[in-house]
Image: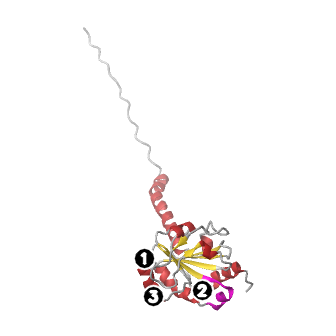
Amino acid sequence: MAHIHMTTTEPKLQPAAPVPAKRRSLLVFLPLLFFGAIAALFLLRLFAGDASRLPSALIGREVPAFTLAGVEGLPGANGLSDADLRQGHVTIVNVFASWCVPCREEHPTLMGIAGDQKLKDLGVRLVGLAYKDTPANVRELLGADGDPYATIGADPNGRAAIDLGVYGVPETFIIRGDGTVAYRFVGPLSDESYAATLLPEIKKAAGANS
């Protein structure tokens, strides 16, 4: 019997088309572009010093309800609540922490604000919100550098600060006499930023003409 030999031709695999050089370069740089964007956002947050760059959703709205106890063992730190911010006069709320280096840098400016006769004439008070701090560390900070605050509320878990929309410390809020948020300053205050930015906003909130 004759044997029939059948031959099969296997399909030849075609080599993959080379990726164009332009596309390869884009693929290489995509991770770098991604990390560059993340770094840019971090730097923006780090160096943002003007509240207008990070506007608060609470501007023009009432402060959230909160009640904070005082700092244990600190005279004059009698606590802070939203009711204290509705007493008919402008209040400056400074959110700070002893472990925050920029907070320590702005402290001399806060001492100057506390002694500013122009603010006293307007009935403006400076109060503090101690963010995620311990009483001992707050007492150490203010005992060494002076206490600029009329009163302080202790916010050990950061809940009140979060409700205010705080990104990080330090931050400073100007609250009108009816309890509405007038202005927000992000970052450490300096004598220059106080004179050029914060003081005009305080006067505006107080309805002062000069």
At numbered mark 1, what does the secondary structure look like: helix, strand or loop?
Answer: loop
Camera-side mark, 3 or 2: 3
* Residue under the point 52% across and 84% down: 76
Amino acid residing under circle 2: Glu
Q: Element under label 3?
A: helix
Q: Which mark is residue 178?
A: none
| Tag 2 residue | 192
Q: In this figure, which residue is indicated by the disc labeled 1? A: 134
Q: CA distance from mark 3 to mark 2?
A: 25 Å
Q: Quadrant of the C terminus?
A: bottom right
Which one is in front, 48 or 143? 143
Disc number lying in front (1 or 2): 1
In this rendering, the count of numbered labels is: 3
Magenta stretch, residue numbers: 116-125
- Sequence-wise, the earlier of marks 1 and 2 is 1
Give the residue type that dot 1 points to. Thr
Q: Is residue 44 visible?
A: no
> On the picture, is 89 further left or further right than 142?
right
Residue matched to label 3: 143
Q: Is residue 95 above or below residue 209?
A: above
Residue 165, image x, y percentages: 56, 67
Residue 24 seen from this side: yes
Q: In which quadrant of the rendered image does the N terminus lie?
A: top left
**Residue 154 falls within the magenta-colored stretch:** no
